[in-house]
Amino acid sequence: MWKDKEQIKSHYALYRIKYREKRKEAAKRYREEHKTQIATKTATWQRRQYYTRRAAGICVECGLVPPASNLTRCFPCHESMTAASRATRTKLLQEIRSHYGEVCVCCGESHHAFLTLDHINGGGNNDRILHGSGIAFYGKLRRQGFPPGFQTLCWNCNMAKWRAGACPHKT
């Protein structure tokens, strides 16, 4: 056999080069055949890593620095997660507005901070109980392909419709 470590290293280096494509194909085939097992193991590993890092008092994302007070992530990781969440929410809200309208159908208000989604035939309370509210509800609408039965109203018109049965602009 080989006499020193250098011969062993060179042998395995040549082997990796020679069979690189064959090993890539085998790995790809394995990933395709065992997709669910890999996903389950990955999720389990991520949960274990999260709780281990949290118990150790280090950032659950990067695992390097202690988290900021009352948080599970250090400040840079927290900021990046917040920015990513904000971008996702903004994109979802833009999709909802582009589909259901960007102005109040009653009074014509167009400032996005005042607009909300209204159930045309009522039933919003049942939807909140079943599916949640806000972004969770908007995500459900997107997954369902933006079903009919909703309209864009400003908050004032929506509350007037709820309390009085009709908006003052309509009467």
Image (cartoon, grey):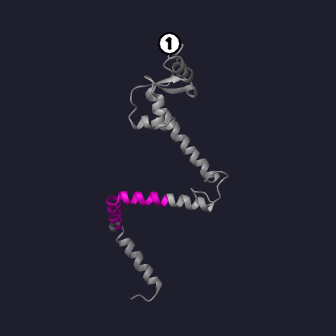
Q: Above or below — where is 93 with respect to 31?
A: above
Q: Main secondary structure of the magenta part?
A: helix
Residue 55, given in percent of the width and then of the height, sits at 60, 61
Residue 21, percent from left and from top: 34, 66
Q: Amino acid at mark 1?
A: Lys
Would you say residue 4 sits in the magenta stretch? no
In terms of image quadrants, where is residue 121? top left
Q: Left or right? Give the position of 105 relative to 74.
A: left
Foreground pick, 20 / 55: 55
Task: From the viewer's perspective, tell me whether residue 142 is left or right of residue 63.
Answer: left
Residue 63 visible here: no
Residue that label 1 marks: 170
- The image quadrant of residue 159 is top right
Query: Image point 42% across, 61% down: which residue?
Result: 41
Q: Please report the residue visible at 52 percent of the width from the left and 27 percent of the height from the top.
A: 116
Badge 1 crowding class, 10 Å Cα cut-off, few under 14, some 14 to 19, many 20 or more, is few
Q: Position of residue 24 (x, y in %)?
A: 36, 64
Point 55% across, 27% down: residue: 112
Regarding residue 51, the answer to whether it shows in the image is: yes
Quadrant in which the N terminus is drawn: bottom left
Q: Which stretch is magenta?
A: 23-46
Q: Position of residue 104 (x, y in %)?
A: 51, 21
Q: Residue at x 52, y 35 (%)?
A: 134
